[in-house]
Image (cartoon, rainbow, N blue to C red):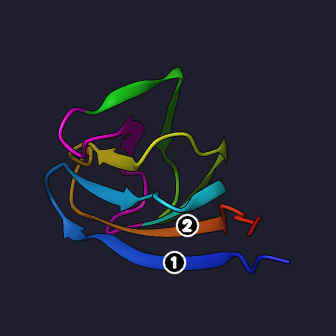
Amino acid sequence: MEIPTITVVTMASAAAAGSTYVFDMRGANIASLQINSTFSNAGDTDAITLKISNDNVTFVAFATNKTVTLTGGTTDHALFELGVIDYAFLQVSYATPSAHTVTLQGVLYACPTITRDA
């Protein structure tokens, strides 16, 4: 049995402007990504978009776009089921918050690629 990994990172801390964060997905077989957001003010919003790349330079959208708009309270959550990983890098882009600041935490759950000796 292969043991899944759980990687917790801060993608943005009190950010007032949009940016990106890149996860290295090499070695992952299947995965999901949970995003936890904390807004400095209730009612603020932010848009999150996932893109993929094999060279960590040029990022493209998934065949079916993976986006979410975080709205409402001061704390929101989103979960992306990534399924089988056939790319090397996953980029999380977040827009400039509608007002104030946002802190984003990413929780990547990944099952490793299984290799067998002949």
Point 51% across, 77% down: residue: 7
Which residue position is annotated with label 1? Answer: 7
Answer whether residue 8 is magenta in the image. no
Q: Is residue 9 left or right of residue 36?
A: left
Look at label 2 and name its amino acid.
Answer: Leu
- Quarter occupied by the C terminus: bottom right
Give the percent coordinates (x, y) of residue 50.
42, 40
Tell me whether the residue at label 1 lies in contact with that at label 2, contact meaning CB atoms closer than 8 angstroms.
yes
Q: How many marks?
A: 2
| Tag 2 secondary structure | strand
Give the percent coordinates (x, y) of residue 36.
51, 66
Give the percent coordinates (x, y) of residue 109.
63, 68
| Tag 1 secondary structure | strand
Q: Is residue 62 above or below residue 50?
A: above
Point 62% across, 78% down: residue: 5
Tag 1: Cα neighbours inside 10 Å, few (<14), some, or many (≥20)?
few
Per the rendering, the mark at residue 67 is none
Residue nearer the viewer, 86 or 48: 86
Q: Residue furthest top?
A: 63
Point 58% across, 60% down: residue: 28
Give the percent coordinates (x, y) of residue 96.
20, 45
Tag 2: Cα neighbours inside 10 Å, few (<14), some, or many (≥20)?
many
Q: Residue furthest right?
A: 1
Range shown magenta: 38-58
Label 1 – label 2 distance at C-alpha: 5 Å
Look at label 1 and name its amino acid.
Answer: Thr
Answer whether residue 41 is magenta in the image. yes
Which residue position is annotated with label 2? Answer: 108
Residue nearer the viewer, 23 or 13: 23
Residue nearer the viewer, 79 or 115: 115
- Quarter occupied by the N terminus: bottom right
N-terminal of the two: label 1 or label 2? Answer: 1
